């Protein structure tokens, strides 16, 4: 399947109706046979549930999200429930996901939706993109999956598919070269299913053919987790949620990380709204 190559036709003919039809047929055929049809968030059109899943899926693998998503939405079944929850409860429910700022962004996003949109996520990507923690790709994903909107966008799996199948011989590819193909290939009445198919295909391709995204000008390699600032932040937050209050020295002893590293993390996380400091070196989780 991954040996299929549309790049010679594209280079010779450009974007033609026959090329697009063949590519659409190829992608939908793949999705019918091998798509991930069992994911819970694909069995709803509720914009809130889809927004939660899309924020969770940012930089987190599907199996991890599949474990945490059901518990999270059981605790916070709608935008109002999440908007009115304490930060500590939201962060506790988020444990295991990583990138904990996303949890606070999601809560603030729901607060905005409740206050400005009567609790209903807007359908337009331009409105969605104004919400806290939402960028171009996530706003378009929510619009496509919740409202079947015919949006045109690129994210990592979509990029991987188009580079692999249309730019096989090129060493460097810019998103500006990919976007016309994404736009031409979109079946306007099937946006939801089409983007599911592309994202599943891109995920499977990474396992089978490596990562074509290394050819992209927009490619940024994710830093290693082990020993990183992210790892220290995660450990500090987990302990703080259990203890409620602690000093840098206590957290260093419990976590095993250097006191200076823990202190730097505490300072950053206080600025970001995770903790408050009493001024005597004691930090407390914001409730």
Image (tube, rainbow, N blue to C red):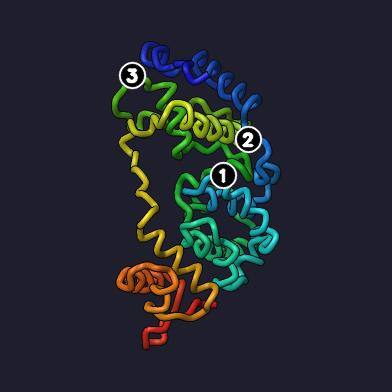
Asked if residue 283 is positioned above or below residue 82 in the image, the reply reads below
Residue at mark 1 to residue at mark 2: CA–CA distance: 10 Å
Residue 165 visible in the current orientation: yes
Circle nearer the N terminus (3, 2): 2
Callouts 1 and 2 close, C-beta under 8 Å: yes
Closer-to-camera residue (69/186): 69
Residue at mark 1 to residue at mark 3: CA–CA distance: 31 Å
Asked if residue 67 is positioned above or below residue 115 in the image, the reply reads above
Query: What residue sits right under mark 1 in the picture?
Result: 62
Point out which mark residue 141 bears. none
Residue at mark 3 to residue at mark 2: CA–CA distance: 30 Å
Which quadrant would the C terminus be assigned to in this image? bottom right
Query: What residue sits right under mark 3 in the picture?
Result: 169
Residue 44, image x, y percentages? 70, 46
Residue 224, image x, y percentages? 36, 49
Query: What residue sits right under mark 2 in the picture?
Result: 36
> Dot 2: few (<14), some (14–19), or many (≥20) neighbours within 10 Å?
some
| Secondary structure type for disc 2 | loop
Residue 115 visible in the current orientation: no
Asked if residue 248 is positioned above or below residue 90 in the image, the reply reads below
Circle nearer the N terminus (1, 3): 1
| Secondary structure type for disc 1 | helix
Callouts 3 and 2 close, C-beta under 8 Å: no
The residue lying at 53 percent from left, 48 percent from top is 57
168 relative position to 78: left or right: left
């Amino acid at each position: 399947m991954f040996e299929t190559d549309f790049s010679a036709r594209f280079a010779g003919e450009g974007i033609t109706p026959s090329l697009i039809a063949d590519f659409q047929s190829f992608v939908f055929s793949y999705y019918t046979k091998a798509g991930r049809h069992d994911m819970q968030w694909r069995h709803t059109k509720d914009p809130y549930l889809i927004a939660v899943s899309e924020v969770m899926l940012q930089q987190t693998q599907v199996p991890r999200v599949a474990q945490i998503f059901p518990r999270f939405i059981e605790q916070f079944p709608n935008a109002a429930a999440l908007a009115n929850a304490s930060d500590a409860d939201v962060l506790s429910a988020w444990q295991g996901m990583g990138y904990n700022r996303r949890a606070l962004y999601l809560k603030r996003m729901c607060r905005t939706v409740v206050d400005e949109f009567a609790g209903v996520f807007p359908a337009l990507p331009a409105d969605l993109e104004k919400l806290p923690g939402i960028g171009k790709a996530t706003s378009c994903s929510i619009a496509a999956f919740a409202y079947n909107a015919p949006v045109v966008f690129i994210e990592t799996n979509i990029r991987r598919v188009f580079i692999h199948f249309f730019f096989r011989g090129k060493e460097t590819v810019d998103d500006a070269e990919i976007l016309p193909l994404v736009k031409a290939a979109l079946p306007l009445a099937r946006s939801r299913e089409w983007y599911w198919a592309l994202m599943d295909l891109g995920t499977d391709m990474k396992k089978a053919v490596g990562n074509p995204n290394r050819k992209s000008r927009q490619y940024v390699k994710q830093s290693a987790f082990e020993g990183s600032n992210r790892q220290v932040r995660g450990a500090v937050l987990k302990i703080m949620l259990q203890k409620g209050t602690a000093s840098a020295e206590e957290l260093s002893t419990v976590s095993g990380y250097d006191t200076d590293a823990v202190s730097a993390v505490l300072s950053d996380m206080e600025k970001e709204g995770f903790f408050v400091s009493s001024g005597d070196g004691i930090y407390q989780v914001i409730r």
